[in-house]
Amino acid sequence: MSRIELLQGTLDFIILQTLRWGPCHGYGIAQQIRASSNDTLQVDTGSLYPALHRLERKKWISADWEVSENRQRVRAYTITAAGRKQLAVERSKWELLSKAIAGVMQPPTTQAES
Amino acid sequence: MTFSGSRKRAQRDLDLDEEIRAHFDMAVRDRMARGESRAAAEAAARREFGNVGHVKEVTRDMWGGVWLERLRQDLSFAWRSLRRSPTFTIVAVLTLALGIGVNTAMFAVLNGVLLRPLPFPDPDRLLAASYKPEGMEYGVTPRMFDDHYVLFEKDTSIFEHVATYGARSLTLTGAGDPLSVSAARVTRQFFSVLGAHPQLGRAFEENDASGDDGTAVILSDALWHARFNANPSVIGTTVTLEGVSRTVVGVMPASFDYPAGTDMWQPWRVVANPKENVGLVPVIGRLKPGVSIEQARQMFAAFAPNLPVVEGPPRTGLVPELIPLKTVVIGDVRTPLLIFSGAIVFVLLIACANVANLLLMRVASRDREMALRAALGAGRRRLVRQLLTETLALTTVGAVAGVGVSWATLRMLLSLAPQNLLPRADGIRIDPWTLAFTGGLTILTAIVCGLIPALHASEHHLHASLGAGARTVTGGRQRLRSLLVGGEISLALVLLTGAGLLVRSFERMRSVDLGFDPRNALEVTVDLPQSRYATSAEMREFDARVVANLGAIPGVEAAGAINFLPLSKTSIAGSFTIEDGRKLPPGYIVGALSVSPDYFRAMGMHIERGRAFTADDRTNGARVVILSHSVAEKFWPGGKAIGKRISSSDNPTAADWVTIVGVVNDVVQGAVTSNPGRSAYSPIAQTDPPFFLRHVTFVVRSRDESARTALTPIEVAAARVLREADPNLAVQTATPIPELIDRTTATPRFQSRMLLTFSLTALALAMIGVYGVLSYNFAQRQQEIGVRIALGATPGEIARMVLRRTMVLVIPGIVVGLGASFALTRVLGRFLFQIKATDPVTFASVVVVLAVVALAAAALPARRASRVDPTILTRAAG
């Protein structure tokens, strides 16, 4: 299994993307990222929590204490309106970038196949 | 940080803990749900999670305002850590206090004397102007010929106003005891140029000055307070200066002191006499608005060729110069001050090297702590920052103590410094600028001392020295420490060499054969004002009466009088004509001195040939002269001068010839460092121009050969004789002549003592460094030494080993230091007397001193090394 370290900006983007589906705590976010990338993206806690607190400080996400199904207090993060706006920006940037990279990596003739 | 702020942060910390614990619990539960045992799940979750401390640390970084929190943590940690090792802390703080303290004091001096702007409005627009004849020296203050000044004063293209001034010493009577005051004659625009206004009364007006002198005077604030009770009604009253009444028209504020030390100002109008204008005056001016200094220079240079040449010394090649007034006011102390500053920076560098060494030593013993903190999640930058904070805490405490040191240093400096050594000394104080400097210096010192140890310390934590033995040999660190000590030795050597040169130069000065015997002699100097002593006859009568009364004081062996005593600042010199028609070499001049008959005996000089003057050499008698040895030998070698005739006139008539009746030994007439003077002595009784008699010094030699204290009753009696002779004279106190010599050599003595103090401080600090490195070195090598002793090494062999180690440490430092001294002590060249800046004796002695002191510093560690108990091996193995 090859794992990829995420760059800081990318991690922010992925966290926002993950939170689009609803509030979630740090552990859940890590698990979701892992699952939705088929275990390719492994988020290190040393990157995850700084990122969460950084996004909170930028007011792109907000945090609240909730009680989980196991009756454990957990800190759940919710994406804010500003966060959604940022996510849209990031996503269009990302689409542009991935198209550009795909174009560079693949010869134009085979582009149709992908 | 406020209380509520820190409470909020504490809550956030708790929250973060809980968040992470929840993460961990959930991970464990998930794993257990997948069938793992609790223990296995916990272990795996922990592994997966990574370093909890580190995660918390980097997460907290995101909170903002974190550096303040960090600083607080680091500081409290630093405080605890420093308290744990009080010896280290005390040594380091004292070293830093010394280094920072003397540097702060030096900065206060530099700031007060060199940097502070002049206390006048727009001081940058003030310039001193001079047309200096090529090749001529005028000392510190630039000047121009007075007829040039008169022309220049009318020119308004460059300066708004120009002014000139001249200070002299006058006697003030009618306001308490007669007082010798420094009176400055100043031209009409003087106060406008400097932008100064009287605090009381008015400045001078056009008709205050009539020719040479006017009747108005302006008082200084100090004189107004001292002699007029600061009474505002002094305006309009009259004072008596040199016996002439003057009207007080104003009082200047205390802040105005130009030229420095002036007690009162008098109006003056420079009048050029086209026949004999050879006077030189200092010229100051305020630039016209809109004229740049560069433009002014060009215009000033263009003005030069139009200047007339009148009689007097040749005036070809006038060099136009415009110099910032501040440069003139600071004068020639700039270079010595900068040299001393350099020396003091050396002391700080040595102190820094010592503290860095101590820190390195400490770091070595804290390897495990560092490794532990790294393991607990502190990043390298955090460790470096922690160590730097600790150093900063150390230097800050050192700096606070250093301000105390600087205060004491300044007090000592200002009380030991010879009077008038430093211009603008009143501005030397520990002010906000100085404290700001200290603050900056503190941070810089912390970085210089702390960075290398901090980088070293944090580097090592990676090679986890947590292992049990952990006696890592840190060879790099040892080399670094030796390098630091080597540097200290080099710096100390440079300072010692400089101090050695100055001390030897000073000794040369003091061992100069002055040609007279200063022991048991004292002098009293007075100026005879024209108002009371109009004719030469009156002054001659006064001199004779005082000499007779002085001679009658019990215990006095001889009393005499001379117009210009050796070592005094002023003198008169001239050429003479020889009767047989031989011409004097060009520029050959001799001191023209007038003495009473017993002067030579009172000064302890000896008549080599012929006779001294006697009471028979009367005003109307045959005119006689006594030459000093070098003059007589130059023109009549082999002692054939007696009976020959010379004249002070260029075209002598029959009455102008005087007969040489004696030859007296040469004396040093000017400063101690000047060449023994060529002099011609005339009897006061036969001296006619009043100018030669206005200034007179009486010399009294005590019969008692014992200590200087025996002079005291004679001092009192001598002063009384003068007071009785004329109660209206401003009598300076009687001064023992040795004290006069001390005074004239005060500046070099002060300089050599200061540099010696600095260099001994530097030496002591460097030796602490040597001691530290060697003790540490041998402490680390205890085992090795134990093995050697167990294998039969004698104490002698161990001692040789120690010696070798010491020399390896010291010799490179000495070699580098010698090179540096060779390059740097040249800056002292100008201050050395009869000693070259590369004097081999000084260099050699300094090296010997340093080597001996280094060996002494090595003695204790060496003794400890040779007494290592071989059983240490068993202990180490266990």
Image (tube, coloured by chain):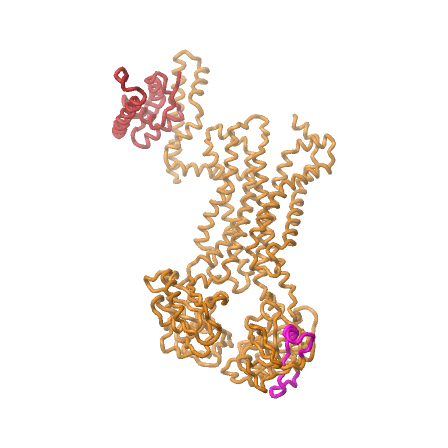
Chain colours: A red, B orange
Q: Quadrant of the N terminus of chain B?
A: top left
In-front residue for pair B549/B693: B693
Place residue B203 in its image quadrant: bottom left
B625 drawn magenta: yes
In-front residue for pair B270/B742: B270
Residue B39 placed where, x, y %? 46, 15
Q: Which residues are magenta?
A: B614-641
Q: Is residue B755 left or right of residue B53?
A: right
Residue B862 placed where, x, y %? 68, 39
Q: How many marks?
A: 0
Reply above or below: B620 against B526.
below
Residue A112 placed where, x, y %? 25, 16
Let me know if residue B459 appears in the view.
Answer: yes
Task: Tell me what residue is drawn at x 68 percent, y 30 percent.
Answer: B872
Reply above or below: B163 against B534.
above
In-front residue for pair B224/B609: B609
Task: Tell me what residue is drawn at x 59 percent, y 87 percent.
Answer: B654
Let me know if residue A79 appears in the view.
Answer: no
Residue B12 placed where, x, y %? 38, 31
Q: Quadrant of the C terminus of chain B?
A: top right
